[in-house]
Image (cartoon, rainbow, N blue to C red):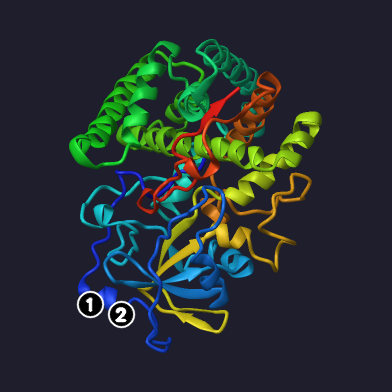
Amino acid sequence: MTATAGTPADTPSTSTTASTTASASTSEPADEAPGYPMERTCPYQMPSGYDRLREDGPLSQVTLYDGRRVWLVSGNAEGRALLPDPRLSSDTDHPDFPYLTERLGSQRFDALPLIGTDDPEHAGQRKLLTSGFGIRRIAALRPHIERTAGALLDRMLAGGDHADLVRAYTFPLASDSTFALLGVPEEDRPRLDACSRRALAPADGDEADSPAQAFQEILGYLRDLIARRERVPGDGLIDDMIRSARGGVDREKLVTICTVLMVGGNESTSSTIATSVLALLEHPGQLAELRNDPSLTAGAVEELTRLISVTDGLQRVAVADIEIAGRTIREGDGVIISTMLMNRDPSAWDDPNVLDIRRKAGRHVAFGYGIHQCVGQNLARAEMEIALNTLLRRVPALRLAVPPEQVRGSVPHALLGGVVELPIAW
């Protein structure tokens, strides 16, 4: 459950032409920097252009949609050094913050809590969530997730011999788990699930206003729910935040935090589960091992999460000069940290491009690293374990309904890897 800076509520870059042209150190070579982000031709493999970036060393340069050159961090050690460094800011209000798409770069929104702020504000927001995403709270939620997974598969199997796994299983499972943790009443969840799907739809064509409208509907619902829970408390994470924030954080901030958790986390977890299924179906030996020995699931989840790295390019801006790997990142430079390249670094992993569910992959950075490490990672792991175990047990004849090359992956401007839909049959 990893929120991504690609949601419509992000604050756009307001960099001027002067600041963008000065975004990379003038001591660097003047050769052309490849465009970024790059498209994955396979939903769980690296874009082909990443090999060149690796050849250029642990730090290289890439060109964004507006011609701005920024740093791209590919080395595992360098990324681990930079992600916790306070000289790199996540503040999306900073005028030199590097946005990856023209749509986000041309609009202005309020900065997102958690992923678009720095300490001490970030620490205060995260403190509100600590108890809700703890191991004990997630363990208590597991029976509910298991029941939901079973019910979704009952419905899917009763509907025929084929389905889109994302629509029928992974997205509703991820969204219902988040709603249950937050304490959203069951009768309201179908409506919010539909809004979440619309909020994450591409803002193109005749439906261009649909995502923004869906976000407004989610915000309106959460305002009403929080107001009700202030009068009559429940037992969800929303109620924990209300109690913790009483007299501190305002209601609108709580609404936005809940929206970030709900929309960003649902999509990233759903996509990781569905893409994991695709990878396993294309590696039948690994799939057979996992199906025959469910005790391997926890380790398989770490390996699949490492390999897929759904949320890849983490955006930062330097607020002071940084010397690293023989390079100088100047104040005002944009920095993109590639968790996928970090998770495929040969200096950190043997045969990093190979799927091995027995690998000790727990030190991956697919959930981030440092103060912005995904607050919902315990929930995401539980959802993945339950989703995979239940699916493989209940659908032994599971197979792809289309050739692998026809599976639709996310496009670069979506800022989130993995599959858009996964046609399956049984």
Quarter assignment of residue 26: bottom left
Residue 324 makes an appearance in the image: yes
Q: Mark 1 points at which residue?
A: 18
Q: Do the residues labelled 2 and 1 touch (CB within 8 Å)?
A: yes
- In the rendered image, the quadrant that contains the C terminus is top right
Q: Residues within 10 Å of mark 1 (few under 14, many from 20)?
A: few
Which is more toward the observer, 362 or 29?
A: 29
**Secondary element at image label 1:** helix
Residue type of the residue flagged with mark 2 = Ala
Rendered view: 381 above or below 194: below
Q: How crowded is mark 2: few (under 14 residues within 10 Å), some or many (20 or more)?
A: some
Q: What residue is drawn where x is 79% and y is 46%? A: 358
Residue type of the residue flagged with mark 1 = Ala
Quarter assignment of residue 100: bottom left
Residue placed furthest toward the front: 403
- Residue 185: x and y in percent read 43, 14
How many discs mark residues in the rendered view? 2
**Secondary element at image label 2:** loop
- Residue 23: x and y in percent read 34, 76
Describe residue 277's horizontal placement relative to residue 113 as left or right.
Answer: right
Q: What residue is drawn where x is 55% and y is 17%? A: 161
Label 2 – label 1 distance at C-alpha: 6 Å
Which is more toward the observer, 97 or 76?
A: 76
Describe residue 22's horizontal placement relative to residue 48 as left or right.
Answer: left
- Residue 211: x and y in percent read 27, 35
Residue 319 makes an appearance in the image: no
Per the rendering, the mark at residue 22 is 2
Describe residue 215's horizontal placement relative to residue 404 as left or right.
Answer: left
